[in-house]
Image (cartoon, rainbow, N blue to C red):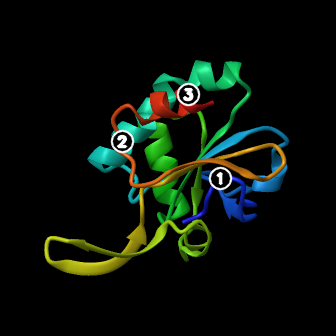
Amino acid sequence: MLESGQTAPSFELPNQDGDQVSLADFDTTVVVYFYPRADTPGCTTEACGFRDSWEEFEARDVPVLGISDDPVSDLAKFREKYDLPFDLLSDESGDVASAYDSYGEKQMFGNTFDGVFRNTFVVGSDGTVEAVFEDVSPDGHADEILAAL
């Protein structure tokens, strides 16, 4: 797992509109959160928590980027359905999630598959990981991040 003080892996991924977004685009602290699947109960709870606290993130000039291995079209529907004010990025290959130690073998209902782990990273303006939240609980996570900022 990445740790505080390490350099955050750079990335460039398409957002819900198909536009490329890079970590290097930001010169401020950024919240990068990984979630397993758009429009599922836990992921919706987590995303809506960030949405409901959005004014506080904006007041601190801290953008939020949600990353999953969903295709762009699914991200667009998810963002529109829940009126999410931040970018959702598509990492269909899982390469970026892997670089953040947030992708690998999972088990559900007796099936084994590769997927995204629910982890969050606060990346400073200098590209250094400032905080790591591993295997987070979706409910109240946005508040947990705000408290850490």
Separation of residues labelled 2 and 3 (CA atoms):
14 Å
Q: Position of residue 82 (x, y in %)?
A: 42, 34
Looking at the image, which residue is at 32% across and 79% down? Answer: 113
Looking at the image, which residue is at 53% across and 34% down? Answer: 145
Please name whichever residue, 114 or 3, is drawn nearer the observer in this view of the structure: 3
Query: How many C-alpha atoms fall within 10 Å of the one at disc 1: few (<14), some, or many (≥20)?
Result: some
Query: Is residue 140 rendered to the left or right of residue 13?
Result: left
Please name whichever residue, 148 or 34, is drawn nearer the observer in this view of the structure: 148
Residue 4: numbered disc:
1
- Tell me the amino acid under the disc marked 3: Leu
Q: Position of residue 101 (x, y in %)?
A: 53, 69
Residue 138: numbered disc:
2
Separation of residues labelled 3 and 1 (CA atoms):
17 Å
Looking at the image, which residue is at 85% across and 42% down? Answer: 27
Pointer 3 residue? 146
Please name whichever residue, 137 or 54, is drawn nearer the observer in this view of the structure: 137
Separation of residues labelled 1 and 2 (CA atoms):
21 Å
Quarter in which the N terminus is drawn: bottom right
Is there CB contact under 8 Å for labels 3 and 1?
Answer: no
Mark 2 lies on a secondary structure that is loop
Of circles 3 and 1, which is in front? 1
Query: How many C-alpha atoms fall within 10 Å of the one at disc 2: few (<14), some, or many (≥20)?
Result: some
Mark 1 lies on a secondary structure that is loop
Task: Identify the mark nearer the N-term, 2 or 3.
Answer: 2
